[in-house]
Structure formats: C-alpha cells, structure tokens
Amino acid sequence: MSYPLPLSPFDGEPIVPEHHAPRGPLQSPLREELSRAKRIVVKIGSSSLTKEDSFITSTEKINHIVDAIATRMGTSDIILVSSGAVAAGMGPLGLQKRPSDLATKQAAAAVGQIHLAYEWGVSFARYNRSVAQVLLTASDIGARDRARNAQRTLDRLRQLRTVPIVNENDTVATSEMHFGDNDRLSALVANLVGADALFLFSDVDGLYDKNPSEPGARFIEEVRTGKDLNGVTAGDGGRVGTGGMATKVSAARLATRGGIPVLLTSAENIDAALADASVGTVFHTREERRLSAWKFWALYCADTGGAVRLDAGAVKAVTAGGNSLLAVGITEVIGEFHAGEIIDIMGPEGEVIGRGEVRFDSAELRGILGKQMEELPEYQRRSVVHADYLSNYASRI
C-alpha cells in the first residue's frame, strides 16, 4: 500500500530544526496506551545505525538503541525490525554510494547482514540477551503456511528471551518480490505477531507538513484520519536508506488498518518514546476501519493467483455495500487459478479495488460470467467470493 503524498526530498535533517521552539512532553490517551503496550515492534532505519561521515555501523548509536529497548523489555515483548544490511556492507566493500543494481545491492546485504547481526549481538549481550536473525521475503509472508511458520518462530524466540531481529532477505529477494522497504515490513510483522504497538524510528523527530528545515514547517502531533495529512509533503530515502517519511507514513497507516497504533519519531528520542511515548507523532486506529487478521493478510500480504474484472455495479456492491461477489458482476477472468486461492478484484478500468478468496477455478468461472444466480445449475449457485473472505481498499481516509 502507498499513501499518495506528493514527494519533496528531505532526509537526514536535524533531529529538531533550530527554528522550532522546543516542545514539552506530549500527552494523550493514545500515548498512555502506547507506553503500556505489552507486545511491540520497533523499527530502526539505516541512518540511525551508521556513522554520520561513513557507511560504517556506529557502535555508539546501536548501544543507545539497545539500552532503551532493554529497559522496555522489563515490561514488554519486543521484536526489532532492523534496516541497515546494505549500508553496513558498503564500507567493507569500499562502496562510496548506495548501489542501484540488484546484484551489487544483494552482495552488500550479504556482507552487511553479518556485520549488523554481530553488532546487535554484542550490544544485547551486555544485558544477557541473545539475538536471532530472521530474514524474510515477501513470498514468506504471502504464503499462508510460511507466514504461520514465521509467526511461530518469532513467538518461540520471544519465549526463549531472545530478541528477534527481522530484516528483508535482500540477498534472495527479487525486484518483483520484495517488501519495498523495512517500514512496510515492520507493519506487516506487527500484524503477523498481533502486536499492540509499532514504533518507527528514523532521523526526524516526527511528521511535519513539509521539509522540517524550512521556516514555518508545522509539526503534526497526531494523525487520526487521512484528512490530517491534507497538504503534507513527505520525502524519499536518504543516502543510505530506501525509505523516507513517505514510506513511514504509508507504513503507519497500513499498521493502523490492522488495529495497531503507531508512534513515529527519531532514534535520538528512543528513550522517551519507549518510556512514556511523550515524543513524536502518533497514528490512531479507527475501529470501523479495522481489518481482521485474515483480511489484512489477504489484502496486503498474500500472493495472488489471478484476477477478475467487475462492472461498475459490482464494484459498488462489494465496496460500499459490503456484499459478496457474484458471477453476474464479473466481466473478465484474468490468469489461471484454483478455488481457495487469493485473487485480485479489479474495477472496469483495471484498477485493483480489493482481494478475496475465490470459490471457483478460473476455467469454471469463465463459463458462468455475467450469469444471474437462478441461471446457474444448483451445484454452482454460490458466490464467487464470499463477503467474509473479501477485503477491499475502500475507505482509506
């Protein structure tokens, strides 16, 4: 999912721009909820792990992060999603800028994953905590059985008092099958493990309506709906990362669709963020928009086997009406799939409006397109996608 914010690059800005007056501790019921969350996912960006003047991991920065996490682990279970593998591999390989071709990027990740895991392991050892590296690809979460296995592994690691450190498996992920950034991955992992909160840390102290270094930039304390983002511009990734504020906003809104509140701030603020959530920008959930775990997985994680195209009436029925998808509203079947697979559901112009678990094979479905239920033989009188197993992208605001 991506939220259509216009982009104007900013990354690597000062933690609190000088022209902004210092803010006191922020308070709200949601911040209190975040401070008490029992199962949380913490995502750390690449720039928060490397030295300012090089592509080498910073032991000082990592120790600061681990100190705060270890303190919070006295009351909460924590899963860490760590960027930085590619960045950590650039120094040892003598690369002066982030590689753009896939092979070099994967080579840097292969080298960097070892360095990064070692740094995390040494730092957590100060608190007698072991770490485990969990490398995931989009296909791992996209396949239901593999997603369950990942979930069980993460749960067992936490039971064994080991800190799971999750990263995208850049060494094998292809350009067609990847999460895109670890911000999105953190939102998906938070949903996978049933987290109570997601904390996103980068190098900016929160969300602003424009580049925070510009005079008049307005800090946004809370995001309750998409309307709070009207007029906001957000930047892309910096010199060592692939994310940026736009991807963090997108990830935050993705997590809230699964009912998981989010706090977004800088890694410099991690102590206060994990202690009482009195810093940064918080993103609220909305109960009326909350998706079940299955619908969230089907909509944002699952591999799809094909697609169907609907007429305008059927689009309205399955989105605004919340009805099951019937054969009469389908105009085209795309691809080959079997009953029980997840398929994309498209509007008349080819726009993807949702996903669902199909109840017909593609070959059988082609034979009943556009037919009313009473025109079908008894054994075919069922919905193509039942409403309980259909999730749509409508009502994102």
Image (tube, rainbow, N blue to C red):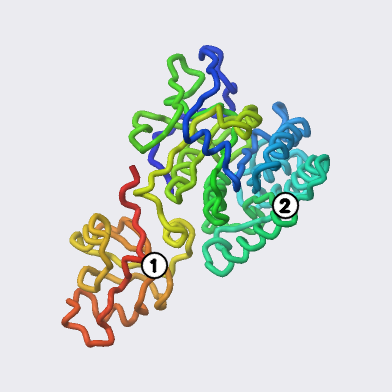
**Residue positioned 44% across, 25% down in the render:** 210
On the picture, is 323 further left or further right than 88? left
Using the image, determine if residue 265 lies above or below residue 256: above
Q: Which numbered disc, 2 or 1, marks the residue that appears first in the sequence?
A: 2
Q: Quadrant of residue 11?
A: top right
Count the marks: 2
**Residue positioned 75% across, 38% down in the render:** 91
Residue carrying label 2: 110
Which x, y percent locates residue 17?
55, 17
Which x, y percent locates residue 88?
72, 41
Q: Quadrant of residue 139?
A: bottom right
**Residue positioned 56% across, 50% down in the render:** 195
Residue kind at label 1, given as amino acid type? Ile
Using the image, determine if residue 277 lies above or below residue 383: above
Crowding around mark 2 (Cα neighbors within 10 Å: few <14, some 14 to 19, many 20+) is: some
In the image, 171 versus 340, the foreground residue is: 340
**Residue positioned 32% across, 70% down in the render:** 385
Which x, y percent locates residue 84?
67, 42
Residue 324 numbered tag: none
In the image, 308 versus 96, the foreground residue is: 308
How far apart are labels 2 and 1 at the CA level?
A: 34 Å
On the picture, is 285 further left or further right than 317? right
Residue carrying label 1: 343
Residue kind at label 2, given as amino acid type? Ala
In the image, 36 versus 146, the foreground residue is: 36
On the picture, is 125 further left or further right than 295? right
Label 2 vs label 1, nearer the camera: 1
Using the image, determine if residue 282 lies above or below residue 363: above
Which x, y percent locates residue 118?
80, 46
Crowding around mark 1 (Cα neighbors within 10 Å: few <14, some 14 to 19, many 20+) is: many
Quarter of the image where the C terminus is located: top left
- Callout 2: SS: helix
